[in-house]
Amino acid sequence: MQDETREKGKWYVVHTLSGQENKVRESILRQLAIENDDIPVYEVYIPIEKVSEVRQGKKTTTTRKFFPGYILVRMDLYKEDCKQVDEKAWYFIKDTQGVIGFVGGSGNHPVPLSDSEVADMLHQVTVQEEKVKPKIAFEIGEAVRIKDGPFENFEGNIQEIDNERGKLKLMVSIFGRSTPVELEFWQVGRE
């Protein structure tokens, strides 16, 4: 983005058809390239995070949307007086294939995200980009089945979760005795 447009506009949440977020984003950007001067839309953003999982015995890292079914659009939705909706901008977004509508506010007057909400969300996404998160979130006390390793098919209860290292400590019954076993997230699954 250019520096002069960086400060323009407010962030709005736009509800899209599930699984259509990327298509909607691309469609908006394509239309902007055609009608660039007339439409006060500056940025379209889909917050994502990296998650790891095991598929067919191999650990893979994929991306997952933070808010499936929603995109964020930085735009000037209201005219200078801040009371009347800029119909060109409104219909530009609303008429995009796959868009359900704006979120927040009432009827034809959506409320933009506050600066603190935007800062929190962007910070959360930036932090998540640095670390890979497991696809499945575990809880202490949860019963899981070991999917890989020397204790495959054993069941255990989660005693500790180390998100930084991606490890779990389980209590597994081996020969009738509870034994602590440390495993990586991908080595266990829900029953």
Image (cartoon, rainbow, N blue to C red):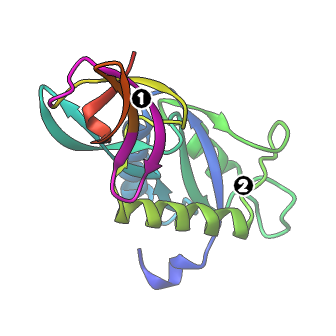
Question: Hey, which residue is sitting farthest bottom in the picture?
Answer: 3
Label 2, label 1: how many angstroms apart (C-alpha)? 28 Å
Regarding mark 1 in the picture, which secondary structure is present there?
loop
- Depth-wise, is mark 2 or mark 1 nearer the camera? 1
Q: Which residue is located at x 60 percent, y 37 percent?
A: 94
Q: Which residue is located at x 42 percent, y 50 percent?
A: 48
Residue 99 locus on image (x, y percent): 55, 33
Regarding mark 2 in the picture, which secondary structure is present there?
loop
Q: Which residue is located at x 21 percent, y 26 percent?
A: 151
Magenta stretch, residue numbers: 150-169
Between residues 18 and 136, which one lies in front from this camera angle?
136
Residue marked by disc 1: 19
Residue marked by disc 2: 86
Horizontal side of 151 relative to 48 (left or right) equals: left
Badge 2 crowding class, 10 Å Cα cut-off, few under 14, some 14 to 19, many 20 or more, is some
Residue 154 visible, this orientation? yes
Tell me if residue 165 is in the magenta stretch: yes
Between residues 75 and 151, which one lies in front from this camera angle?
151
Q: Which residue is located at x 65 percent, y 35 percent?
A: 101
> Tag 1 or tag 2, which sits nearer the N-term?
1
Residue 98 locus on image (x, y percent): 49, 29
Quarter occupied by the C terminus: top left
Contact, mark 2 vs mark 1 (Cβ under 8 Å): no
Residue 133 locus on image (x, y percent): 38, 49
* Number of numbered labels in the structure image: 2
- Amino acid identity at mark 2: Asp
Residue 84 locus on image (x, y percent): 83, 55
